[in-house]
Image: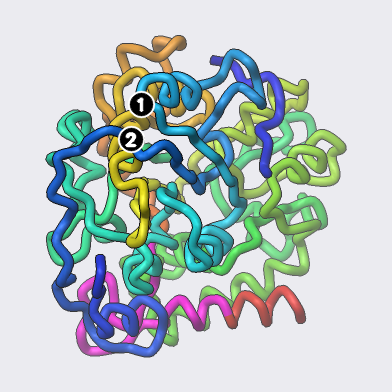
Amino acid sequence: MQISRLLKVGATGAAVALLAAACGSGGSSSTPSASPYAGPVGKGEGTLNVLAWPGYAEDGSTDPAVDWVTPFEQKTGCQVNVKTFGTSDEAVQLMSGGGYDVVSASGDATLRLVAADKVQPVNTSLVPNYADVFAGLKDKSWNTVDGVNYGIPHGRGANILMYRTDKVSPAPDSWAITFDPNSPQKGSVTAYDSPIFIADAAVYLMATQPDLGIKDPYALDQTQFDAAVALLTAQKAIIGEYWSDYTKYLQASKAGTTTVGTSWQVIQNLAAADGTPVESVKPKEGATGWSDTWMVAKDTKSINCSYLWLDWIVSPEVNAQVAEWFGEAPANEKSCALTADKDHCATFHAGEEDYWSDVYYWNTPSEKCLDGRTDVKCVPYSEWSKAWSSLRNA
């Protein structure tokens, strides 16, 4: 499906040690004490409040032809209310305030939600379509804690390098064009406005400064972290603007004030559909990316509607629709036979695990190094947030 218009942006008892590890004060994780909902999944309670990335819960209001929420309501009797968010920090804040039953959380939010005791373990046996999810998305560090699943994989994508083909020549194959102080695109470079972007700098340093010893861009000791922040501080001189609202990114790209920078596939799709001459590439150094997870709020009063939604959103037909609309690889392997564009899964490398080998999915940095090191402490996400705020406000 070709996108033709803008999307509207509109566990009980996770251990205290896990909270400390994920949120910044140190410690190590322990096995969550809660047991997943035993079921069986019964009749829907009547209402489901969904917190989602834009494009993940479409009800026809963005485009009448794009609607998988209404059929869900008709089938289950669960009336869906959707709230969208623009960053993982916003998602965590909204979930912390309560009022939502399910959330589509990226890896830089999932462990924070588990640690804060805002989500509950998920019983994958009550989600029949989970069986067909690509093995490469199951039981990962951002959706599973000590063997306990905390959600259902939704899809995956790489954070790509997008560029204006009429203004950037030759076509770039490296992130250097966005980090080199002498970049020919100085003043028209863009970058994602989030603390998690520090990992993008770390990916570049992994390839260009191997002596730093970075193995995981979300597991940075103080020396590695300082190097990443120094790179981003130097980069600031060539940045035209940072982005988190991708509708503004689209406007800047169309106007030509932004010519190159980190992007999502959906942004390229929308820009191209609007006539902007853009292409994208996964640079030779690799890239960060996302593997999103549908999670269930700890205190939901609509547990049946929640599980019905989890199974619906990862079903072959619906997951195919979401993947095409958003511009990502589906989570369900059977979705590949159901996409309108029969080349969709090939284009987005859905089943090509080699492609994903240098895509580092968003994760939550903690003092306990995610790369397995025990001889040093890594810099936790709270410090990433402070450093990013200081950089942006300097």
Q: Earlier in the sequence, mark 2 or mark 1?
A: 2
Residue range highlighted in magenta: 363-385
Left or right of 297? Residue 185 is right
Residue 334 screen position, x and y as percent:
25, 20
Q: Which of 126 and 373 is in front in this view?
A: 126
- Please indicate whether residue 245 sits to the left or right of residue 295 in the image: right
Secondary structure of residue under mark 1: helix
Task: Indicate the quadrant containing the N terminus: top left, top right, bottom left or bottom right.
Answer: top right
- Per the model, the C-alpha gap separating discs 2 and 1 is 6 Å
Looking at the picture, tell me which residue is in the foreground, 215 or 341. 341
Residue 44's mark? 2
Residue 90 visible in the snapshot: yes
Position of the C terminus by quadrant:
bottom right
Q: Which amino acid does label 1 sit on?
A: Thr
Percent position of residue 167, x then y? 79, 36
Q: Residue at 37% of width from left, 55% of height from top?
A: 300
> Which residue is pictured at 51% across the width and 30% down the height?
327
Where is residue 147? Give x, y as percent.
13, 60
Q: Name the residue under label 1.
A: 76
Q: Do the residues labelled 2 and 1 touch (CB within 8 Å)?
A: yes
Secondary structure at numbered mark 2:
loop
Name the amino acid, label 2: Gly
Place residue 169 in its image quadrant. top right
| 181 w.r.t. 381: above or below | above
Tell me if mark 2 has few (under 14), some (14-19) or many (20+) residues whose alpha carbon lies within 10 angstroms of its own: many
